[in-house]
């Protein structure tokens, strides 16, 4: 597999417990051909994003725990109700060591620090 990154929208990933959540956005290693016969595993995931309106409690509890336990390095929750981007980094056990909240400015995925994403623009397209 190569070092390219692929953005997958509402497609499953496979966790160690064989569950297959479907994050709204997954930034993963590789190309489409890498996932013709299987879904990405946690080791292939750079970033997961959930866009949350009615599912905020689940996204901040069950999904966050599952993603942390799987070792997903970065998890973003786009809280549409409160216009807040909640960023989790550094998984440890069933939680993340870092939680930050943003409502403006720019953010970069930790694995791609040269890419700047406008938080304000995220809410316009969500």
Image (cartoon, rainbow, N blue to C red):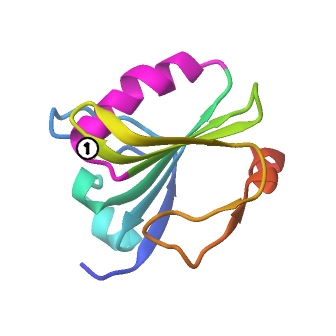
Callout count: 1
In this rendered view, identify the residue nearer to me: 107 or 22.
107
Query: How far from the left and from the top, in percent, is residue 114?
Result: 57, 79
Q: Is residue 17 left or right of residue 83?
A: left
In this rendered view, identify the residue nearer to me: 6 or 42.
42
Q: Which quarter of the figure is the C terminus placed in?
A: top right
Task: Residue at 49%, 26% (x, y): give it.
Answer: 59
In magenta stretch: residue 28: no
Task: Residue at 38%, 73% (x, y): give it.
Answer: 31
Q: Is residue 70 left or right of residue 52?
A: left
The overriding secondary structure of the stretch rendered in magenta is helix
In this rendered view, identify the residue nearer to me: 110 or 41.
110
Dot 1: within a 10 Å radius of its alpha carbon, few (fewer than 14), some, or many (20 or more) residues? Answer: some
Q: Is residue 111 above or below residue 70?
A: below
Query: How far from the left and from the top, in percent, is residue 16?
Result: 15, 40
Q: Is residue 93 visible?
A: yes
The part of the image, by quadrant, that contains residue 12 is top left
What segment is highlighted magenta in the picture? 54-73
Query: How far from the left and from the top, in percent, is residue 29?
Result: 35, 69
Say which element carries label 1.
loop
Q: Is residue 38 visible?
A: no
Query: How far from the left and from the top, in percent, is residue 75?
Result: 45, 45
- Circle 1 residue: 14
Task: Residue at 58%, 65% (x, y): give it.
Answer: 108
Task: Residue at 32%, 49% (x, y): give it.
Answer: 72
């Amino acid at each position: 597999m190569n070092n390219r990154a692929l953005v997958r929208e509402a497609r499953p990933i496979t966790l160690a417990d064989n569950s297959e959540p479907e994050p709204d956005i997954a930034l993963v290693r590789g190309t489409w051909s890498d996932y013709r016969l299987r879904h990405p595993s946690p080791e292939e995931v750079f970033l997961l994003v959930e866009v949350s309106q009615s599912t905020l409690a689940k996204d901040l509890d069950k999904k966050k725990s599952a993603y942390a336990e799987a070792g997903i390095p970065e998890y973003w929750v786009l809280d549409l109700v409160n216009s807040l981007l909640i960023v989790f980094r550094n998984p440890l056990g069933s939680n993340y060591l870092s939680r930050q909240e943003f409502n403006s400015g720019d953010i970069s995925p930790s694995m791609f620090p040269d890419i700047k994403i406008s938080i304000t623009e995220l809410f316009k397209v969500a």
